[in-house]
Image (cartoon, rainbow, N blue to C red):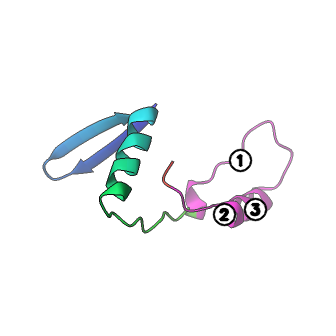
Amino acid sequence: MGYDLINNCGTIHFSNVGWAKVLTIAEHFGWKPMGTVLRDFTVRVPDELDISNEEYIRKTVERWDGEYC
């Protein structure tokens, strides 16, 4: 598991630990995160939960904190 940054020039892969370090270094040098947005169509209800799709999606999107990790 990890994070991939992809653009027209190629791909860079970071482990979970590496990604956290990259964010820390970037913030140290002045990078200001814009945050992330969780789209409702990306949320999947785990099979073991007895909850409606709409309710689970709504609650998950409401709790989203916008962090990168």
Q: Give the CA separation, mark 3 to mark 2.
A: 6 Å
Which of the two marks, 2 or 1, is nearer to us in this view?
A: 2
In this rendered view, identify the residue nearer to me: 59 or 12: 12
* Amino acid beneath label 1: Val
Q: Position of residue 37 (x, y in %)?
A: 52, 65
Whole-percent x, y for residue 17 in the image? 44, 33
Local packing at callout 2 (Cα closer than 10 Å; few below 14, some 14-19, many 20+) is some
Say which residue appears at 45% left-offset and 35% top-offset.
16
Q: Secondary structure at mark 2?
A: helix
Q: Which mark is residue 61?
A: 2
Q: Label 3, label 1: how many angstroms apart (C-alpha)?
A: 11 Å
Tally of numbered tags: 3
Residue at 34% across, 49% down: 25
Which residue matches tag 3? 59
Residues tagged 3 and 2 counted as in contact (Cβ below 8 A): yes
- Secondary-structure class at tag 3: helix
Around disc 1, counting alpha carbons within 10 Å, would you say few (fewer than 14), some (14 to 19), or many (20 or more)?
Answer: some
- The numbered mark, 2 or 1, whose residue comes first in the sequence reads 1
Question: Residue reaching furthest left?
Answer: 9
Q: Residues within 10 Å of mark 3 (few under 14, many from 20)?
A: few
| Residue 47 on the magenta span | yes
Residue 32 coordinates in the image, percent (x, y):
38, 67
- Residue located 70% across and 61% down the image: 63
Q: In the image, what residue type sits under mark 2? A: Val
Determine which of the numbered discs, if any, sits on residue 58 in the image: none
Relative to 33, is 26 on the left or the right? left
Instruction: Tell me, yes or no, whether the two marked residues, 3 and 1, touch with CB atoms within 8 Å.
Output: no
**Which residue was labeled with disc 1?**
45
Instruction: Look at the numbered discs 2 and 1 and tell me whether their residues touch, using CB distance below 8 Å.
Output: no
Give the magenta part as a residue range. 40-67
- Mark toward the viewer: 3 or 1: 3
User: Residue 34's spot in the image, x, y percent?
Assistant: 43, 69
